[in-house]
Image: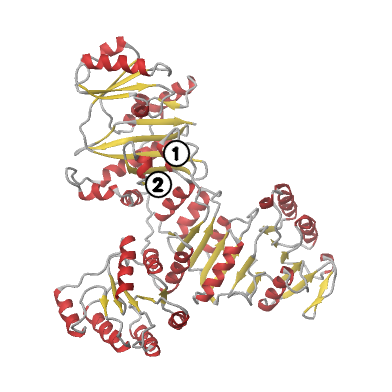
Amino acid sequence: MFNPVNIAIIGASSREGSLGRGLAENVLESFRGRVYLVNKRGGELHGLKMYREISEIPDQIDLALIIVPAESVPETIEQLGEKKTKIAVVYSGGFREAGRKDLEERLIDTAKRYGIRILGPNCVGFIDSWTPINATFISRERQGIPEKGFISIISQSGALGSLFLDLLSYRRIGLRRFVSIGNASDIDLSEILEYLSHDPYTRVLGIYIENIGEGRRLIDIIRMISKYKSVVILRGGRSVRGSRAAQSHVGALASPGKLFDDILRFSGVYIADSLRSFIASLEAYERLDRSDYKKDVVIVTNTGGLGVLTVDSLEDKMISLKEFDEIEMKILREIIPSYMAVGNPIDLSGDAPTKRFKDVIENLLNITRPRLLVIINQPQTYAMDTENFISFINELRNKDPNTNMILLISGGEFAIEFARKIRRLGIAVAEDPEELSSMIQALSMTPIHGEPMISRLENRREKGIKIIEKALKEGRHILYEHETKELLNIYDIDTPKRFFAKDLKDIEKSKDLLRYPVVIKIVSPEIIHKSDVGGIVLNIRNYEELLESYRRMLDKLGKYRIEGVLIEEMIEESLDVFVAGMRDKILGPVISFGSGGILVEFIKDVAFGLHDYSEKEFEYMIRSTKISEILSKGYRKYRPIDISKIVSVLAKISKILEDYPEIKEIEINPLRILDEKMIALDARAILN
């Protein structure tokens, strides 16, 4: 596809304004090999004959570009099969996306019969800046096409893909390859990614995704690529999947988008939250090496207000400014005018010419070497001699290429042209504080990989399968709480001492087995959230209170099918977290962690990861939540804890999912954290 000997364009046209003409002109303008045009009416375009039939073409066809009505595409593929065509790009719409799934299936069946690979249908094509070939119908007069470079773009949306190209061109970001996959009925996103992963000239991958139906295969390929290439993803269609919310917290929290974003973010992939941050991060990756810049940023600015907004945006993304020591502050006071405050940001004020920028920055680099230098220049003031400033930046770049810097230039036409000249020097330029913080956040993404923790854990299926088989024989799709806790105990996850009682006679047996105070919980296949219906009573101090609580509970919940009650010793108050595992239809087994308690769905402080994560990946997952700060630093009555203990619980839940494919979801909420151990106070499991 990217390196054809010849190309046939079926549906080429000489009519002004037609997509067939636009496609043909783009190919003729860019491609150096032979091009054959096909149009059933015949004619010519720019002196090149248009054949009426594919069969008239005198050569075997390497690459076919098809831009004819959808109904004609399968027949066109059949004719190309006779010409030994290897691959075809189908631009035509009107297939699955328009409710014609049958027509798309006929297209693919025909292509498979002749061994023809299909890109599309319903796409805008592809570009290879190095071959070169522009096999799109994008207007070169109305938008920019990027220069030759090292960034490859794959887009599920053709219209957005063309916009990406325009924005890359505007920002002077070089392009290696662009592919619009459309309906991806044959060649899919994973296959193109895998191909580009081996391309030495693709250093950065930008991906726009709406549908993650390729699942775990797609995740694994992106995680693999992120080890040695920078990857930026912009995702559309952030729909919430709420169908399981009635049964479990984890189901309510696990939207497909949340799963996808969390899993990839922990792999060093940058998930852009907007179109601007997507394009800005691509610019940053093209012009700076990936490294952790988040704790050592120095800002030099000629505008205090923009400096303040920048600091706010950096703090929102947990990016820290460098703190100068006493010696550095003393030197800075000597070179900065006395009427200006000395600190970070270094505010040179609006009357700063290039000379002041130069004096401060050169002295600054002599006394300290910040990881990242941010230069904010609002060029609209009379004092700013912009051409001298551009010369200074170029001189600084050439003199010390190890200085990592990003410029922030905001404004209208004058500022845009000023920024364009800076970009020509190969310097990254942000256009507002949010773009800047996105650039730094993207550059600081670090891939985390390692041996899966579950590979070191013992398979204990034989010990626990009887619990699951009993439930299935009884026609249940859930495990009762005491059964789930029995399963957790098999995997060395602590639970409170407990006693399951079917009736009053059983409760009498528990009289001397448990220490008071205790808690009593209803056990029913029809009750999932016990606290919502009064199915739990806490802090029962003696046997008489236990009997009274039992009778009241049965009276209140008599309309439900009651299997019995679970009596457990009360555990002292402490910090609670949420741990769960689920089997996602698209991504397979996933693990979640976050703040625990009955408000887990409301607070939504939760992170997701794959069940076969390494120890470092699980730790990174935990530290991405808000509650992790309390866990690691302590807060008021809560003392700091060893995060590795929670990592161990996550690994054990992962192992349960791996050992028992019968389990659809398993949840511990809360997992209470005490000084020496963690105890699963409440637990449930849902079966397939």
Q: Earlier in the sequence, mark 1 or mark 2?
A: 1
- From the viewer's side, name the closer residue of 355 and 472: 355
Q: Is residue 201 visible?
A: no
- From the viewer's side, name the closer residue of 407 and 102: 407
Residue 666: give x, y in percent of width and height: 40, 34
Residue 278: give x, y in percent of width and height: 47, 64
Q: Is 652 drawn above or below residue 72 in the view shown?
A: above
Q: Is residue 161 left or right of residue 265?
A: right
Kindly indicate whether the residue at mark 2 contacts the one at mark 1 (C-beta within 8 angstroms): no
Residue at the top extreme of this rendering: 505
Residue type at mark 2: give it: Phe
Q: Nearer the viewer, mark 1 or mark 2?
A: 1
- From the viewer's side, name the closer residue of 69 and 547: 547
Which circle marks residue 608 in the picture?
2
Which circle marks residue 223 in the picture?
none
Q: Is 554 drawn above or below residue 103 in the view shown?
A: above
Name which quarter of the figure residue 373 lies in. Answer: bottom left
Q: Is residue 85 visible?
A: yes
Quarter that holds the N terminus: bottom right
Name which quarter of the figure residue 70 lies in. Answer: bottom right
Q: Is residue 207 left or right of residue 667?
A: right
Q: Is 349 drawn above or below residue 98 in the view shown?
A: below
Residue type at mark 1: give it: Gly
| Residue for point 76% across, 70% down | 12
| Residue for point 19% across, 17% down | 542
Which circle marks residue 251 in the picture?
1
